[in-house]
Image (cartoon, rainbow, N blue to C red):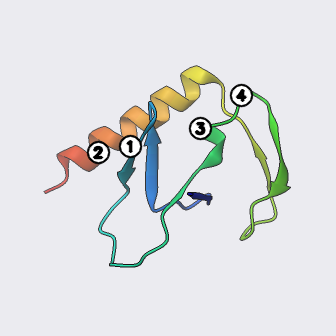
């Protein structure tokens, strides 16, 4: 399983999870659940660190933001 975080260690992009940076052995893998929920769907629990509601992104917002982040990861040395 993969837990939620607004500061995730993994990037969810089109059904795949990419490391959002270097991961130490045994590090918890987290993703931002807003990419997994239907647009405007509210998760039954809040973010553990911030207490904010977890509300699904619009599809175009999810794809645009995850694509930009993946491009930045691939361009990094």
Q: Does dot 2 land on a helix, a strand or a loop? A: helix
| Residue 72 image label | 2
Relative height, residue 72 to residue 39 (above, below): below
Give the Cα distance between marks 1 and 2. Answer: 5 Å
Q: Tell me, for residue 35, which label it has, or none.
A: 3
Q: Is residue 60 above or below residue 70?
A: above
Q: Quadrant of the N terminus?
A: bottom right
Marks 3 & 4, CB-CB < 8 Å contact: no
Disc 2 to disc 4: CB gap under 8 Å: no
The residues tagged by marks 2 and 4 sit, at their Cα atoms, a distance apart of: 25 Å
Total labels: the figure holds 4
- Helix, strand or loop under label 3: helix
Answer whether labels 4 and 1 touch (C-beta < 8 Å). no
Rendered-image quadrant of the C terminus: bottom left
Residue at image location 38% in from the left, 43% down from the top: 69
Q: Is mark 1 on a helix, strand or loop?
A: helix
Q: Position of residue 54 (x, y in %)?
A: 76, 48
- Image location (x, y in percent) of residue 8: 52, 60
Q: Earlier in the sequence, mark 3 or mark 2?
A: 3
- The disc placed on residue 69 is 1
- Which residue shows up at 71% across the image and 71% down it? 49
Q: Which of marks 4 and 1 is nearer the N terminus?
A: 4
């Amino acid at each position: 399983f993969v837990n939620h975080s607004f500061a995730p260690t993994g990037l969810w992009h089109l059904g795949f999870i990419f490391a959002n940076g270097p991961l130490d052995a045994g590090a918890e893998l987290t993703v931002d659940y807003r990419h997994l929920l239907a647009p405007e769907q509210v998760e039954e629990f809040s973010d553990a660190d911030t207490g904010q509601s977890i509300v699904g992104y619009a599809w175009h917002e999810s794809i645009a933001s995850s694509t930009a982040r993946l491009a930045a990861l691939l361009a990094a040395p």
